[in-house]
Image (cartoon, helix red, strand yellow):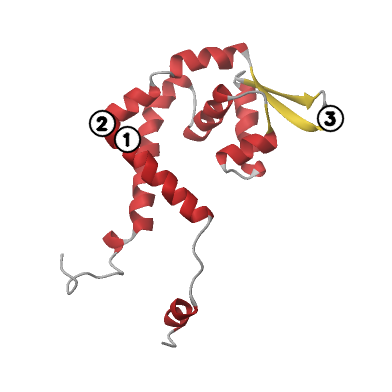
Amino acid sequence: MDDETFDPLALENQVCYSLALAARGVIGAYREVLAPLGLTHPQYLVMLALWQDEPRSNRELAQALRLDPGTLSPLLKRLARADYVTKARDASDERTLAVRLTPRGRELRDRAVNVPLIMIRRLGLEDRDLGALNDVLHGLIEAADHPAEVTSAERRALVGTV
């Protein structure tokens, strides 16, 4: 595509549009794979965080998953009802709620161990492609967390005072 035909406002040229569609599609593909485990995608992310390191406080989990504590709380309640996690006050700090895996939650890990391989196959990715994609996505996350300042010239262009 040459510069004369490139439309910077075409929907298909928007990174946000591509990312939104890709995210919805990938999460939808996970739905079928996670259903036999009795997990939704957000619950799966919580379990991944706990399988990696537990116990964790509500705050630590919310930070690791980049979720608002108000969003995390119902996820933990459902996981507790399924007997995958327990929530209890931390003995060393009564103000902190410690989230721990139950024996059933630890056993679930053994059943979930093939989820990443199944998803790689379902999405048609090669290991090298997955690594490169993950690197790009982590770079985008970092850039979104620390965006460059909008310059005064850019700001003027946005309000039409160029």
Q: Which residue is mark 3?
A: 94
The residue sitting at 43% across, 18% down in the picture is 113
Residue at mark 3 to residue at mark 2: CA–CA distance: 47 Å
Q: Which residue is mark 1?
A: 130
**What amino acid is at disc 2?**
Glu
**What amino acid is at disc 3?**
Glu
Q: Between residues 51 and 128, which one lies in front from this camera angle? A: 128
**What amino acid is at disc 1?**
Leu
Residue at mark 1 to residue at mark 2: CA–CA distance: 6 Å
The residue sitting at 42% across, 85% down in the picture is 160
Instruction: Kindly check if marks 1 and 2 are in contact, taking CB atoms under 8 A apart as contact.
Output: yes
The residue sitting at 42% across, 81% down in the picture is 157
* Residue 67 at x, y percent in the picture: 59, 43
* Residue 38 at x, y percent in the picture: 49, 23
Instruction: Kindly check if marks 3 and 2 are in contact, taking CB atoms under 8 A apart as contact.
Output: no
Question: For residue 126, which numbered disc appears in the image?
Answer: 2
Secondary structure type for disc 1: helix
Side of 55 where 92 appears, left or right? right
Secondary structure type for disc 2: loop
Work out which quarter of the rendered image holds the C terminus and state it.
Answer: bottom left
Q: Residues within 10 Å of mark 1 (few under 14, many from 20)?
A: some
Side of 157 where 92 appears, left or right? right
Judged by depth in the image, the label closer to the viewer, 3 or 2, is 2
Q: Is residue 124 above or below residue 154?
A: above
Secondary structure type for disc 3: strand
